[in-house]
């Protein structure tokens, strides 16, 4: 699954580069109002509260951003990440986060656009073990992070990297690091 996602993201990026090179040189708008992001996400989850240690989960991240005024916007963030046989325990873990909050991007004519955000919402964890069933827990979640986008053309950019610190209140509190990369569409 991870290899398929990497291959698909590579094809999307290469197609975007080819498309951007074919278009005439035009002055890109400095401040598009909307952005959509889709990409690969790797979450390092601290699952010590469940006796599993820590684990790496892979998945997808979707974000929608609307810039309200200049560089300040509102962002919705949805992530799904999974891990099988976590810490060789036979436990499969799925994590879903639904976050929302403000984002600030340093937008200019530059090729690179750094940003920072603070997001709040919910986190759902699903633990399943063969023959024993599954357990689902829900908790508050908060994310603090940022990253940088590299412009490919008028409407496309590559998210070179996004790093988030995510805190959830599962079992007295868990801390997670999330790395994300993918494609941004601006309009």
Image: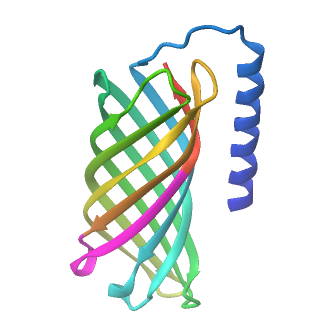
Q: Which residues are magenta?
A: 169-180
Q: Nearer the viewer, residue 40 or 152?
A: 152
Which residue lies at the image location 48% right of the left edge and 57% below the top edge?
80
**Residue 53, position as x, y percentages in the image:** 44, 87
Q: Report if residue 44 is visible in the image.
A: yes
In the picture, residue 141 is in which quadrant?
bottom left
**Residue 143, position as x, y percentages in the image:** 31, 56
Q: Is residue 72 magenta?
A: no
Q: Quadrant of the N terminus?
A: bottom right
Q: How is the image coloured?
A: rainbow
Classify residue 90 as left or right of residue 11.
Answer: left
Which residue lies at the image location 77% right of the left edge and 15% below the top edge?
22
Q: Nearer the viewer, residue 104 or 176?
A: 104
Total marks shown come to: 0
Which residue lies at the image location 45% right of the left edge and 47% below the top edge?
147
**Residue 159, position as x, y percentages in the image:** 55, 42
Q: Nearer the viewer, residue 97 or 13?
A: 13
Question: Is the residue 51 above or below the residue 155 in the image?
Answer: below
Question: Is the residue 179 above or below the residue 155 in the image?
Answer: below
Classify residue 4 as left or right of residue 186.
Answer: right
């Amino acid at each position: 699954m991870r290899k398929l996602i990497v291959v698909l993201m590579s094809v999307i990026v290469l197609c975007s580069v080819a498309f951007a090179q074919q278009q005439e040189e035009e002055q890109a708008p400095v401040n598009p109002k909307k952005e959509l992001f889709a990409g690969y996400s790797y979450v390092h989850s601290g699952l010590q509260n469940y006796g599993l240690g820590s684990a790496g989960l892979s998945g997808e991240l979707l974000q929608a951003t609307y810039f309200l005024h200049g560089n300040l916007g509102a962002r919705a963030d949805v992530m799904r990440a999974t891990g099988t046989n976590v810490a060789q325990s036979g436990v499969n873990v799925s994590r879903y986060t639904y976050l929302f909050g403000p984002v600030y991007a340093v937008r200019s004519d530059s090729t690179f656009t750094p940003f920072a955000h603070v997001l709040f919402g919910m986190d759902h964890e699903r633990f399943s073990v063969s023959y024993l069933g599954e357990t689902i827990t829900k908790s508050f979640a908060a994310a603090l992070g940022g990253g940088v986008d590299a412009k490919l053309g008028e409407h496309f950019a590559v998210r070179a990297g996004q790093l988030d610190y995510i805190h959830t209140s599962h079992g007295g509190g868990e801390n997670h690091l999330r790395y994300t990369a993918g494609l941004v569409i601006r309009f």
